[in-house]
Image: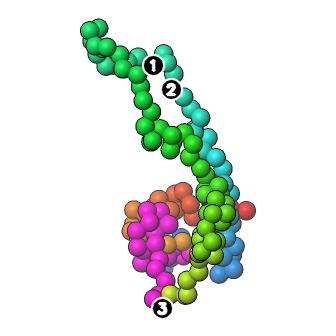
């Protein structure tokens, strides 16, 4: 009579496991994709509320209308700059240390690891892809949506 086989061990054997070089390439590709997303303008920055939207405020007819004044917050939102514009402005106007010239020595503390799903500190590593996770719930989300998916 043959012994029973563990489902967990059977799953591990069937799964594809990446070596360290493949993990580094995959990590680098994910970071490059994030960097590409960072340099785009906000697609919703120019949206304007429709004037046909119903107003749910009660207006008193006896109340005189005041002229609307625009606060500093309005202008901050209307004329906000993206990250690259802020970096270029910092380079042009500051002679001292700035974003591109700031440097720090390597840390004397060990590297901290964070969950790839929720961002909390993590103690566990996914066997196939090497991503970090902190709990069984995050592992489930990782396996369903991220683990070795959408990579070339």
Q: Is residue 125 above or below residue 41?
A: below
Question: Viewed as shown, does residue 73 lie left or right of 101?
Answer: left
Q: Secondary structure at mark 2?
A: loop
Q: Say if the magenta span includes residue 117.
A: yes
Q: Is residue 126 above or below residue 79?
A: below
User: Which picture quadrant has residue 83?
Assistant: bottom right
The residue tagged 1 is 53
Q: Please state, as top left, top right, bottom left or bottom right, where the C terminus lies in the image.
A: bottom right
Residue at the top extreme, as displayed: 61
Q: How many discs appear?
A: 3
The residue tagged 2 is 49
Coloration of the structure image: rainbow
Is most of the magenta stretch helix, strand or loop?
Answer: loop
Mark 1 and 2 residues: CB-CB less than 8 Å, in contact?
Answer: yes
Question: Viewed as shown, does residue 152 lie left or right of 64?
Answer: right
Tell me the distance, in whole angstroms, between the alpha carbons under discs 1 and 3: 57 Å
Q: Is residue 56 above or below residue 116?
A: above
Q: Which residue shows up at 50% across the image and 66% down it?
A: 116
How busy is the neighbourhood of tag 1: few (under 14 within 10 Å), some, or many (20 plus)? few
How busy is the neighbourhood of tag 3: few (under 14 within 10 Å), some, or many (20 plus)? few
Q: Which residue shows up at 47% across the image and 87% down it?
A: 110
Nearer the observer, 51 or 4: 51
Q: Which mark is residue 96?
A: none
The magenta region covers 108-130
């Amino acid at each position: 009579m043959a012994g029973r086989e563990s489902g967990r061990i059977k799953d591990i054997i069937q799964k594809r496991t990446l070596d360290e070089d493949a993990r580094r390439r995959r990590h680098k590709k994910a970071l490059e994709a994030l960097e590409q997303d960072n340099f785009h303008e906000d697609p919703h920055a120019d949206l304007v509320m429709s004037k046909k939207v119903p107003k749910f405020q009660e207006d008193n007819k006896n109340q005189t209308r005041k002229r609307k004044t625009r606060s500093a917050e309005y202008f901050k939102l209307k004329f906000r700059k993206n990250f690259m514009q802020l970096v270029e402005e910092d380079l042009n106007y500051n002679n001292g240390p700035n974003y591109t010239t700031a440097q720090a020595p390597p840390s004397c503390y060990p590297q901290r690891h964070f969950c790839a799903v929720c961002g909390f500190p993590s103690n566990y590593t996914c066997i196939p892809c090497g991503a970090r996770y902190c709990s069984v719930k995050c592992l489930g989300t990782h396996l369903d949506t991220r683990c070795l998916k959408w990579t070339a």
